[in-house]
Image (cartoon, rainbow, N blue to C red):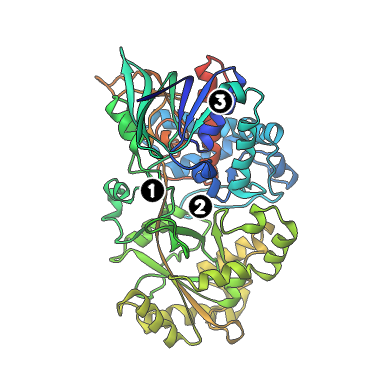
Amino acid sequence: MIEYKADTVIIGGGIAGITAAIELMNEGQKVLVLDRDVEEELGGLAKWSFGGMFFVDSPIQRRAGIKDSVELALRDWHSVADFGDQDVLPKLWAEQYVNSCTDHVYSWLTKEHGTKFFPIVHWVERGLHKPGNSYPRFHMVWGTGKGLTDDLIKSMNGHSKAATHLLTYYRHKAEDLILENGRVVGVSGLNESNGQPFVAKGENILVATGGMGGNIDRVRETWYKPWGTPPKTILNGSHPYALGDMHDAVDRAQGNVTNLDWHWHYAAGVRHPKPKWKDHGLSLVPPKSALWLDYTGKRFGPNPLITAYDTRWTVEEICKQEKKYSWQVLNMKIMMKEFAISGSESNEAIRDKNLLKFLRDILLGNKKLVNEMLNSEDFVTANSLDELVDKMNALEGTNDVKLEHVRDSILPYDDMIDRGPKFHNDEQLRRIAHARQYRGDKVRTCKFQKILDPKAMPLIAIRESILSRKTLGGIQTDLSGRVMSKPVNGVSEPIPGLYAIGEAAGFGGGGSHGKGALEGTFLGGCVLTARIAAKAIVDKKL
């Protein structure tokens, strides 16, 4: 049995764990980071992310004439969160994030770690049946999530105290917390590179292991019951080690784990063309000008599905169907203008900070990405509607898609485009017009493009599955990141020596987003919860 010691043991080397390590070394703490992955993958899910971060009244917003405010942002947050009266700590963490994110995440990243952001703020989760983001708040890291994690890894490993105050061990799987006299004093586990068990002890143990979206069996077990039974296919767009192991360990240590049925899934998941694990999926940024159809080829309605407004509602609508997957039908012109995939892997130009390539992709389309995905499993192309429907059915191995359904979905839509904008009476066309008023969307959105346009062929159909991503619930913490005990007679107390941050803590309090999210709050939540917990460990305020 190998035994390690440090002032603080951090379980998990994602963005939350890395941030905490930096802040603890700033305070003179000796830090031990345990990560299950290999060194090259340090950074966790954040490394693969698109790199969007939610800030309020940021310098970039102000330069763009966006007059955002904490009051408005918090109102929007509560609109999508749908908190209940019992969600006291999640509400307080939501307020803490909205009030603190720009000063303690944006400024900290840009001034202390050299992180740069794209000059145009993206506008996502605008709200559909209830308010969402009243203003654009999705700040893209120049370099995507990989650039963000690179900046923080550089700061951690290059810290002036790293040689004497930082130990990092890879391929170390944490399994159980060690308690002595009611205090958590360590963690036991297995070095998976050699099969040797280990114990890591410290004055404080900080859980930063992410969510459980990579455990599809667990996703099914905790499926949100109002949505019925889980889909037959759920793709894994999370991290392969986001399994919920430490949620269970905290539970065994009498910590309070809450709201595990609050998931953040995506509606437009497709199979990775070069999968790294079972059912490895990618999350599309669904083209706004494509028609979104159910498994039989009927257009969703009466409100059509369209991206950037309400992700949770879109997932819910698809899950109301007998078969819980969907299709998007479009053509090559739409594909070249609007097609994108969320994540660093699929956005080489931004990830590699290549401005010329990025501008070329905007103007001409990302031909490399389009061609790669057109040859992948969930995409079919055809030169006629009959051929397209045949290929859709052949792909799924059923006769569920009906030609008349697809035709009846497309022809009225194309006919309305022919009438001209003055006579558009289709909700999707109205929302396309609205999106094009904002410069961040105009450049990536077609101007009322028909589907059956002979000049825009071939036709394309994309089979889209629900994709697992984030766990919005998690280990309940107080406003300092201390893990709360299971209630006894309605009373919970902090467990001495135990902290949780990032997605493991539901981004604060066991569910700071509630049931929904405004997007960009995940990376920011990891950074903020880590900074707050690190300061609390040394008995300081952020």
As helix, strand or loop, the secondary structure at mark 3 comes to strand
Q: Is residue 429 left or right of residue 324?
A: right
As helix, strand or loop, the secondary structure at mark 2 comes to loop
Residue topped by disc 3: 166
**Crowdedness of circle 1 by 10 Å Cα count: few (<14), some, many (20+)?**
many
Amino acid type for the residue under numbered disc 1: Gly
Give the vertical position of 58 relative to 282 (above or below).
above
Residue topped by disc 1: 214
Percent position (x, y) of residue 398? 30, 77
Q: Is mark 2 in CB contact (under 8 Å) with mark 1?
A: no
Percent position (x, y) of residue 157? 61, 32
Residue topped by disc 2: 127
Depth check, front residue: 238 or 320: 238
Percent position (x, y) of residue 440? 66, 57
Who's the residue at 41% across and 80% down the image? 406
Q: Is residue 29 left or right of residue 218?
A: right
Residue 477's mark? Answer: none
Mark 2 or mark 3: which comes first in sequence?
Answer: 2
Depth check, front residue: 193 or 8: 193
Mark 2 or mark 1: which comes first in sequence?
Answer: 2
Give the vertical position of 311 relative to 375 (above or below).
above
- Where, by quadrant of the figure, is residue 417 drawn? bottom right
Q: Is mark 2 in CB contact (under 8 Å) with mark 3?
A: no
- Where, by quadrant of the figure, is residue 90 drawn? top left
Amino acid type for the residue under numbered disc 2: Gly
Amino acid type for the residue under numbered disc 3: Leu
